[in-house]
Amino acid sequence: PKEERPLPESYKKNSKKEKIVLSYAENFRRQFVHIFGDRKPLLLTPKNECQIEKFMSSYIRPTQLRFKELYDYDGAAEFVSDYVTYELLKNPTDLPSSMRSP
């Protein structure tokens, strides 16, 4: 069994900069709801495993990984099977109530 390590303090509270980012995200969310009120909510600031709101960046940018074994499907599949835990959502069309930190 994997040993549980204590979580870092950054998981348990937000820094001043994180609080500023959270306020920007909330401002964006309010504008989004006002303009696109009929759409599903955005997943911008889910709570982490310590029940603390954290901003979750949702864009993807091209990047070069230093782990060359992830560039082919065999290596990527092995990585996923070793390190990713799949958790079913109670309702797959709704947003999750929390997100685990990396």
Image (cartoon, grey):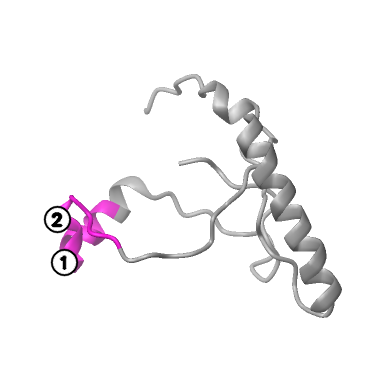
Question: Quick one: quadrant of the N terminus?
Answer: top left
Q: Residue at x 53, y 54 (%)?
A: 87
In the structure shown, which secondary structural element does the residue marked by tag 2 occupy? helix
Can you tell which quarter of the image residue 72 is in?
bottom left
From this view, report whether residue 26 is shown above or below residue 72. Answer: above
Can you tell which quarter of the image residue 96 is in?
bottom right
Q: Nearer the viewer, residue 22 or 85?
A: 22
User: Magenta span covers which residues?
Assistant: 63-79
**Chief secondary structure of the magenta portion:** helix
User: Tag 2: residue type?
Assistant: Glu
Q: Where is mark 2, residue-wise?
A: 69
Residue 71: x, y in percent? 18, 64
- Callouts 1 and 2 close, C-beta under 8 Å: yes
Residue 46: x, y in percent? 67, 49
Q: Where is mark 1, residue-wise?
A: 72
Residue 41 placement, left or right of 61: right
From this view, report whether residue 33 is shown above or below residue 3. Answer: below
Q: Residue at x 77, y 78 (%)?
A: 39
Residue 92 placement, left or right of 73: right
Q: Residue at x 62, y 38 (%)?
A: 18
Q: How many marks can you see?
A: 2
User: Tag 1: residue type?
Assistant: Asp
Residue 30: x, y in percent? 82, 62
In the structure shown, which secondary structural element does the residue marked by tag 1 occupy? loop
Q: Nearer the viewer, residue 25 or 68?
A: 25
Question: Quick one: quadrant of the C terminus?
Answer: top left
Residue 74: x, y in percent? 17, 63
